[in-house]
């Protein structure tokens, strides 16, 4: 039988510490972090939960538990842990910011905003709190204040490296007939596509217009004749007189929910489109509708645990008659196709899709794209392709609240999860709608 060790530490019959029961604080944290690093999130949580049972007033245990619960999709528990940290450390603005994020992951936008505002009251310059408040406002359709708060994203860690130096002039939206203006992509691929619609508006005020963005986005941005120069890094743009973050353009133009400009219509390269259409003509049986499919996004995204899933989650689509599934999935997740034995054909195009030119050409040959929330959704929406999106329970602010349509992309239809990571009922609704859609198309 175990007994009490030094400082009350639990020991087993061999005199070893029982992990997480009443280890010294540093050892609990070290053991938790080690297991987390080794990919044993369940083990890390078990250590923490035992430690919390023995010492329920240690705020750092609850703070780490909040993060681990989030990673495994236990968002109710994550919010509970964050609330406990706030109770233990009510004057710590970071605690309120973490609670705001936990509320956001549950779709509790009111709670998210309230917690963020408490953090701001304690620390007026806390960028993460302002960003959370901005996301809550934008999701609620309050664009007037939301865009202003959204500017705090530029103060978040990891952003500064892409921003031009402080001596550069920040453009305020005024006419600039002389001198070069540099736009820079301050966020991800989907954001570049979403906000590229503002490029013609900017060019009307600043004819000498350049943009700085990852090279993978160049096939898309080359479709904007207003851009005189496209570079990867701001210092390659030569002598620029001012700059503007791409994501700040809605603020400069004063975009409101009812004044969102339509996307600039993107088009596939005709030669590539013809080649991919011919390829699919040879693969897909005649009379079958071509349904593009993506079930996983960028694994580096902070919300990927909720936005991405497994191919198995979409197997209900294989019950729909007269459809062929065409996978555009890239990355490690495309290996899941090897285990697919569904009733309808599934064609794996991922290995042959090398860039966004290929992606646009494939989309051009499809009848419909079904996808989780990825950059390709924005691309298909900007092309005007019918696109159905399986959204996580707590969707990104740009998809707003409670809507099944998007004012950003008229061709997009949204399918929202009824609970966190509830993929099965969500995909079942998509499959039912696809069956009705196919029947109407062939009836």
Image (cartoon, rainbow, N blue to C red):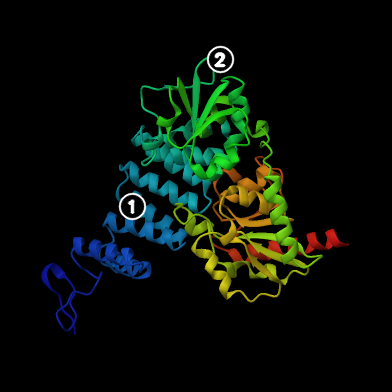
- Above or below for 120 versus 169: below
Any part of residue 335 in sight: yes
Q: Is residue 256 left or right of residue 188?
A: right
Residue 197 image position (x, y, % from top left): 62, 34
For disc 2, the marked residue is: 177
Q: Is residue 252 left or right of residue 168?
A: right
Tell which circle, 2 or 1, labels the residue nearer the N-terminal end.
1
Point 46% across, 32% down: residue = 151
Residue 72 image position (x, y, % from top left): 44, 63
Any part of residue 413 in sight: no
In which image quadrant can residue 341 be found?
bottom right
Point 74% across, 56% down: residue = 367
Could you say which is closer to the camera, residue 379 or residue 253? 379
Give the Cα separation between the discs numbered 2 and 1. Answer: 53 Å
In which image quadrant can residue 81 be found?
bottom left
In which image quadrant can residue 152 be found?
top left
- Determine the secondary structure under disc 2: loop
From the image, state whether disc 2 or disc 1 is nearer to you. 2
Res. 85 mark: 1
């Amino acid at each position: 039988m175990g007994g009490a060790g030094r400082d009350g530490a639990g020991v087993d019959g061999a005199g070893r510490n029982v992990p997480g029961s009443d280890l010294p604080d540093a050892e609990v944290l070290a053991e938790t972090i080690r297991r987390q690093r080794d990919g044993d999130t369940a083990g890390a949580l078990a250590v923490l939960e035992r430690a919390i049972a023995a010492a329920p007033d240690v705020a750092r245990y609850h703070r780490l538990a909040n993060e681990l619960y989030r990673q495994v999709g236990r968002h109710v528990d994550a919010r509970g842990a964050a609330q406990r940290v706030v109770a233990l450390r009510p004057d710590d603005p970071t605690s309120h910011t973490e609670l705001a994020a936990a509320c956001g992951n549950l779709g509790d936008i009111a709670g998210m905003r309230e917690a963020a505002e408490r953090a701001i009251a304690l620390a007026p310059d806390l960028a993460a709190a302002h960003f959370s408040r901005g996301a809550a406002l934008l999701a609620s359709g309050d664009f007037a204040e939301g865009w202003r708060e959204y500017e705090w994203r530029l103060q978040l860690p990891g952003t500064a490296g892409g921003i031009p130096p402080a001596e550069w002039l920040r453009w305020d939206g005024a006419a600039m007939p002389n001198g070069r203006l540099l736009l820079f992509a301050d966020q991800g691929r989907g954001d570049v596509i979403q906000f590229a619609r503002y490029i013609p508006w900017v060019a009307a005020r600043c004819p000498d217009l350049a943009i700085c963005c990852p090279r993978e986005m160049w096939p898309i941005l080359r479709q904007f004749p207003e851009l005189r120069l496209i570079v990867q890094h701001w210092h390659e743009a030569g002598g620029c007189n001012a700059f503007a973050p791409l994501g700040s353009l809605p603020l400069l133009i004063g975009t409101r929910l009812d004044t969102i400009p339509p996307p600039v219509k993107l088009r596939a390269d005709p030669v590539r489109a013809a080649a991919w259409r011919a390829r699919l003509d040879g693969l897909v049986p005649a009379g079958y509708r071509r349904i593009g499919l993506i079930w996983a996004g960028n694994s580096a995204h902070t919300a990927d645990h909720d936005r991405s899933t497994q191919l198995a989650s979409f197997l209900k689509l294989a019950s729909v008659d007269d459809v062929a599934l065409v996978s555009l999935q890239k990355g490690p997740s495309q290996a899941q196709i090897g285990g697919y034995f569904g009733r309808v054909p599934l064609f794996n195009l991922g290995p042959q899709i090398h860039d966004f030119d290929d992606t646009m050409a494939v989309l051009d040959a499809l009848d419909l794209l079904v996808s989780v929330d990825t950059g390709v959704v924005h691309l298909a929406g900007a092309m005007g392709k019918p696109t159905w999106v399986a959204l996580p329970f707590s969707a990104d602010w740009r998809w707003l609240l409670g809507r099944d349509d998007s004012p950003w992309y008229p061709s997009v239809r949204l399918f929202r999860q009824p609970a966190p990571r509830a993929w099965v009922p969500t995909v079942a609704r998509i499959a039912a709608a696809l069956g009705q859609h196919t029947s109407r198309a062939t009836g």
